[in-house]
Amino acid sequence: MDGSLSQLIVFLAAAAIAAPLGRRCGVGSIIGYLVAGIVIGRTGFGVMAGDQAQLHNFAELGVAMFLFLIGLELRPRRLWALRYAVFGAGGAQVLATTVAFTLLALYSELSFGTSLLIGLAISLSSTAFSLQALEERGELTTRHGRLAFSILLFQDIAAIPMIVLVGFLAAANGGEAPSLMAFFKGLAVITAIVLAGRFVLNHVYAIIAKTGVREGMTASALLTIVGVAYLMHLVGMSPALGTFLAGILLADSEYRHQIESDIAPFEGLLLGLFFMTVGMALNVGLLLSEPGQILMVVALIVAIKAAILYGVGRWQELKPYSARKLALTVSQGGEFAFVLLTAGAAGHVVDQKLADSLAVAVTLSMGVTPLLLMADDFYTRRFKSKPEPQFDSLPKKDGHVVIAGFGRFGQITARILRANRIPFTALDISPDQVNFVNQFGNKIYYGDASRLGILEAAMTREARAFVLAIDDVEASIRTAQILRQHFPDVPVYARARNRQHVHQLLDLGIENIERETFLSALDLTRDVLRGLGMTDKRTRFIIETFKESDEKRLYEDYKIQSDLERLRVRALKQSQELEELFAQDVVETSDPERPKSQRSASSLEASAPSPG
């Protein structure tokens, strides 16, 4: 117990210090985590070698969660649209890199099996390092960011047959050949994940959401990821690939934003732990004993892969600036290289010392990635006065509106937006309301809009407007507070239940406010007056005068809302003034000889603040 707690304290302290310090120094959180891992690995801090291996396996859940969250953002239709980039650019990169390093290893007088293993291992890049670097720099949505993701996705897919191929290479050296049963097990697991994601998971989340137990949703989301990762691990396949697939299948779920918000904190901590375990596994002794040779291998890995990736980028019609960014982002070795090298050493395909040296070189190449990107930024600022644009030009109509609360108020807004083909993301905390509304063709998502994670998942920062239509006053105010604090530039249009709610929203600086029943009550009163025999002109005058007077009083009361006695006096005064105004209007209407200027003067004098 003491040992476990001490290790937990060490890793939490490292996470709390390393990432912010790395960001502060300008090298990024990844380098911070790597350095922290190296320090922990060299000093021990109570972490034994066996513990390091177990920690690394546990930390891989962070990579699995990272890919799961990316899958949540990629609907199947979007993934299908990326198929040419995935198999075209990804396939070209893996093939070209494998051939290049296989030939280089053959030139170094290694056997064909060893050379092929080295080529395959180095052709794979680190999904975690590359995508985390892109996310930190805000480049995941750029053209080179999307192409990098496509290439990394193909690599994760290609890693599966590569592992099988290493088994055959080991069999050629006297080992046991892989059986077809393993292949069919993998196919069965993938099929089970697809079927569960398509037909089961959404119903499970709906049942749990109805209970209203927030930690139940969090636990079910974590269970999905851990369960899928475990199944993929059992059949010797990539857990990250399995969770990515599960994320894609839940991308159209109305619970997507809630799941994303619940998973994000765990993903960040475990991904940081993964980077630290990579640093801990670095064989510093081997690096110190053969620094020149290992650093030369690192340079070859980064240079050759970068050159191939730059060519692939230009082939995919990226401009030179974007192609260079792609090349530097994905030029490192990957965590699957460790898997292939370990399997190859166990099957006597590659010498153990050579495998260890290559593992050190791959680890160092990961750490080089953020530094290369920093150097490229410096070069761009120093020598390029007008860098090429990184982002696609998005048409104005692609901006969306976020609607928080999808009851009777929010639905009217949504129907009008849809009729005008304005995209929107609707959130509601009631699972019953979500399920009911979805039956009528309106796509809304289950999520608590008063939580920052949910608003970030709904991409509120990029929204053209935010409609605050939450029925519960306290939840509405909490949401408004988060909006003003974290998204001050997003225009907010709020629905208020009563005058006090309006005043609370005004306190937060929200000015576009409509009381939910005020206008409908005026419309009904207009019909009542007409039914009582009043003329349309008289009715219109009464309603418009009352509306103007009440709205003026609403905002003037805001200035003295803490003085109840003054509010009471003003309410009585307004009621009396309105009675006098309407009585005076009856006299003026019945006396057509009275000058119009006097009538107008009377009306203006009587339009003082009044109760309502």
Image (spheres, rainbow, N blue to C red):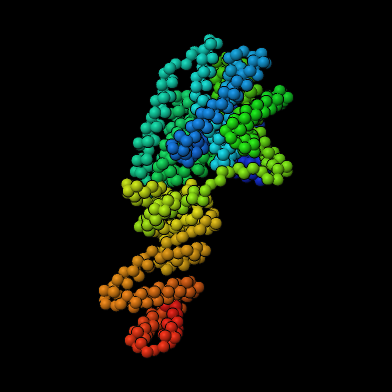
Kindly tell me whether residue 31 is visible in this rendering. no
Question: Which quarter of the rendering shows the C terminus?
Answer: bottom left
Q: Nearer the viewer, residue 68 or 234?
A: 68
Q: Nearer the viewer, residue 77 or 511?
A: 77
- Which residue is depicted at the point 51% across and 25% down? 158
Residue 232 x %, y %: 45, 28
**Corner quadrant of residue 595:** bottom left
- Which residue is depicted at the point 45% across and 66% down? 502
**Corner quadrant of residue 93:** top right
- Residue farthest bottom in this picture: 593
- Which residue is depicted at the point 30% across and 77% down? 535
Considering only vertical position in the picture, is 346 above or below 469? above
Kindly tell me whether residue 373 is visible in this rendering. yes
Residue 194 x %, y %: 39, 32
Q: Nearer the viewer, residue 175 or 247?
A: 247
Q: Nearer the viewer, residue 344 or 444?
A: 444
- Which residue is depicted at the point 49% across and 50% down? 397
Residue 120 x %, y %: 57, 22
Residue 358 x %, y %: 63, 23
Considering only vertical position in the picture, is 387 above or below 89? below
Q: How many marks?
A: 0
Considering only vertical position in the picture, is 556 above or below 425? below
